[in-house]
Image (tube, grey):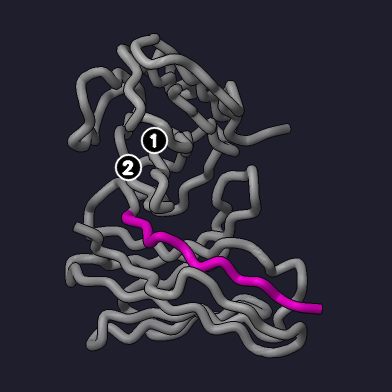
Amino acid sequence: DTAVSQTPKYLVTQMGNDKSIKCEQNLGHDTMYWYKQDSKKFLKIMFSYNNKELIINETVPNRFSPKSPDKAHLNLHINSLELGDSAVYFCASSHGPGQGVEKLFFGSGTQLSVL
Amino acid sequence: DQQVKQNSPSLSVQEGRISILNCDYTNSMFDYFLWYKKYPAEGPTFLISISSIKDKNEDGRFTVFLNKSAKHLSLHIVPSQPGDSAVYFCAARKTGANNLFFGTGTRLTVIP
């Protein structure tokens, strides 16, 4: 039973396309995240949702739009893909604030390559 | 603005010896520190953590040391085993925040 699962694992697409990455967690956590690991291996937060509410929105182009239909799912939609969007995107989840939020559980990542 | 830094991108150690991975941070508001381990094609997994009110936390072969005055923490693995070969990320949390700030990782190779 995978705790945090994200699909697809690999995504190769052309510039200008729109794509989505899905994430689901079965840990009963309240908070979910999207992190981006760029070519310099820097792992940086993009978004965080707590009980379907957006609580963190870092300086990310508005071409990136997260959607949380319920607290077990957090999907990432990217419009008009650019070469610089190529990276590994990690979904993660944790307990809510005050309940061990610091211990993140990560998915296995989605390697996005924009050609 | 990288608030958590791991200045050694790689480290090689003989099996059975001690591995010491280092991490520096700049933000004095960090109150909780974690180490994550990452194998290829997998997501990072939690390894060990330490609160800023402590200076040492031990879990089996893994010990994390925190030097607040120097804004420095280290992960000691002893004895090192080939299965410890992975990328290790240092991470930190600000008081009251929901997210973690990560370093760029150190690739540890344990040579049999």
A58 and B47: which is toward the camera = A58
Is the C terminus of chain A in the top left, top right, bottom left or bottom right quadrant? top left
Q: Amino acid at mark 2?
A: Ile
Farthest top residue in view: A17
Name the disc covering residue A33, or none: 1
Circle 1 residues within 10 Å: few <14, some 14–19, many ≥20: many
Name the disc covering residue A45, or none: 2
Is the N terminus of chain A in the top left, top right, bottom left or bottom right quadrant? top right
Residue A45: x %, y % from top left: 32, 42
Q: How many marks?
A: 2
Q: Dot 2 falls on which chain?
A: A
B68 and A36: which is toward the camera = A36
Pick whichever of labels 2 and 1 is earlier in the sequence: 1
Q: Is residue A109 left or right of residue B52?
A: right
**Magenta-highlighted residues:** B101-112
Residue A90: x %, y % from top left: 47, 37
Q: Residue drawn 75% across and 67% down?
A: B83
B96 and A33: which is toward the camera = A33
Residue A10: x %, y % from top left: 59, 26
Q: Is residue A31 visible?
A: no
Q: Dot 1 falls on which chain?
A: A
Against A108, residue B64 (above or below) is: below
Q: Residue drawn 37% across and 40% down?
A: A96
Farthest front residue in view: A115
Q: Are marks 2 and 1 on the same chain?
A: yes
Against A6, residue A16 (above or below) is: above
Residue B60: x %, y % from top left: 67, 78
